[in-house]
Image: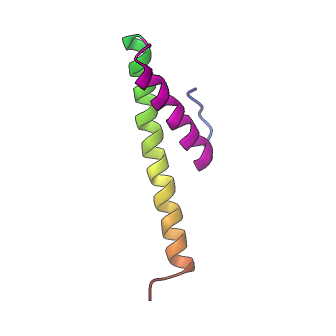
Amino acid sequence: MAEKKELSIDKALDRLEEINRQLETGDLDLEASLKLYKEGTELAGKLKSQLEGVEKELQIIEPKA
């Protein structure tokens, strides 16, 4: 599921959980596992960036006292 369009945070988290479950089963061959691992690490990086952006927006809306 290597989509080029931006996933919502919720959908991206769901996909990351799905990838984790598939990798944990150990039923995949090495090539499939590596492909999923790569997708998962890319997705995790995008999620981190999105969440940092949300955090900055919240700090603007409600600055610390």
- On the image, which quarter does residue 25 sit in? top left
Rendered location of residue 51, percent (x, y): 49, 57
Give residue 27's position: percent from left, percent from top: 44, 13
Q: Is residue 62 magenta?
A: no
Which residue is outermost to the top?
A: 29
- The x and y percentages for residue 31 are 40, 13
| In the image, residue 42 above or below residue 10 | above
Which of the pair 51/14 is nearer the observer?
14
Q: Which residues are magenta?
A: 9-28
Please identify the quadrant where the C terminus is shown. bottom left
Q: Residue 11 sits in which quadrant?
A: top right
* Residue positioned most to the front: 25
Quarter of the image that includes the N terminus: top right
Q: On the picture, is 9 further left or further right than 42?
A: right
Image-based side of 7 in relation to 38, left or right: right
Count of all numbered marks drawn on residues in the image:
0
In percent of the image, x 48 and y 69: which residue is there?
A: 56
